[in-house]
Image: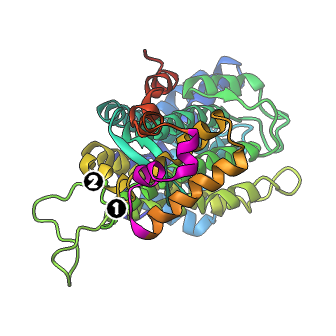
Amino acid sequence: MIPRYSRPDMVAIWTPETKFRIWFEIEAHACDAQAALGVIPKQNAEAVWKARDVPFDVARIDAIEAETRHDVIAFLTHLAEIVGHDEARFVHQGMTSSDVLDTTFNVQLVRAADILIADVEALLAALKRRALEHKDTVRIGRSHGIHAEPTTMGLTFARFYAEMDRNLSRLRDARAEVATGAISGAVGTFANIDPAVEDHVCDKLGLVPEPISTQVIPRDRHAMFFATLGVVASSIENIAIEIRHMQRTEVLEAAEFFSIGQKGSSAMPHKKNPVLTENLTGLARLVRMAVIPAMENVALWHERDISHSSVERMIGPDTTITLDFALHRLTGVIDKLLVYPQNMLDNMNKFPGLVMSQRVLLALTQAGVSREDAYRLVQRNAMKVWDERSDFREELLADEEVRAALSEDEINEKFDLGYHTKHVDTIFARVFGEG
């Protein structure tokens, strides 16, 4: 992923230096386990740890790989150069390349998941703060983009909080799904290596042993992981779309923070564009782009082919780096989001009183009017408001058929905004677990 959409902690997980360091730890821990079993001399296992604090020469490994055309062999050759060829002769005993590659990939995914989980937790904190801040800030709810009934800005934030809280659970499940390792040999049968080696390596790396592998760890685990990242990205876009809608000039109920010196357009100095949330929409597409290839990686020939390898070399870093950046950016947007309560009320009243139509409909049916007739009466007056921008309450009060069923006080009572917010505390208690 390009630096523009990258953050250093996540990028560091995917550097060659980090990868080779994990490879080394797997090999060294495996040697310790082999020595404990009496398979290799203890002094040889101890000698491998001489490379513990030695930086691996990435250029040297690349040069060896250019000749061997095999990345793990290139690394093992370089490791032997550091440790000593005789001392290193038992490294990789009974193992296959995928033992190293797959276990390393899962270590990287687990570390990436830890960062993403922390990102979502930070976003949740921002959403909760803004939800409480605007719990009672009334705005119009919209369905099909059309005014429906009143809601609150706090409920909007709370809805996004609940969605991201579900994503937090999904990410934790996805982390657990890929937190496995395999040190089981050429086709996963442990023919040339004891299962105790796998147990030891996994314990040292914070993984659990894969119950059954072939030459590779089953890729349904990774499909679930990347599918989860795709869901999180879609939730980011869901929030971004709402903010983009609210920032439209004719709506302007909320807007991204516009810093001093920021420019919105090279041609039009008046512009304040929702560039951050538009960017988030695009980044969400990139994360979701990895989902189908990850699912297609599940089907491999027999005990293994490498059709998944090139895919994972790209989607592993690209999706986690992109999603980390997007979550961090969205948290900043939410933290600094400008909210305009008066504009919310002004928008709701562009068609005065119209959004109370359901209350009047229900009151008429409760007064003995059939639902069909009640709907006809309410819609007849509502259409006047649409066409003439008149006041819905005044139209109802002037309608003899409506007045035959409802008194003036009964009609006026149906225009109380508090009616629509009376259960906000109940919803907040459900979402945040507070009274």
Residue annotated with mark 2: 343
Residue name at image x 63 percent, y 66 percent: 69
The quadrant where residue 33 appears: top right
Mark nearer the N terminus (2 vs 1): 1
Quadrant holding the C terminus:
top left
Q: Residues within 10 Å of mark 2 (few under 14, many from 20)?
A: some
Check if residue 285 falls in the magenta segment: no
Main SS category, magenta section: helix
The quadrant where residue 1 appears: bottom left
Residue name at image x 69 percent, y 50 percent: 373
Q: How many marks?
A: 2
Q: Is residue 163 left or right of residue 310?
A: left
Residue name at image x 27 percent, y 53 percent: 343
Q: Are marks 2 and 1 in contact (CB under 8 Å)?
A: yes
Q: Work out whether residue 203 or residue 88 is closer to the camera in this orientation and state it.
A: 203
Q: Is residue 235 left or right of residue 6?
A: right
Identify which amino acid the numbered label 2 is placed on.
Answer: Asn
The chosen color scheme is rainbow
Residue 97 in view (yes/no): no
Check if residue 393 falls in the magenta segment: yes
Q: Tell me the SS state at disc 2.
A: helix
The quadrant where residue 211 appears: top right
Q: Is residue 311 left or right of residue 10?
A: right
x and y percent of residue 381 in the render?
Answer: 52, 58
Q: Work out whether residue 196 or residue 122 is closer to the camera in this orientation and state it.
A: 122
x and y percent of residue 370 in the render?
Answer: 72, 43
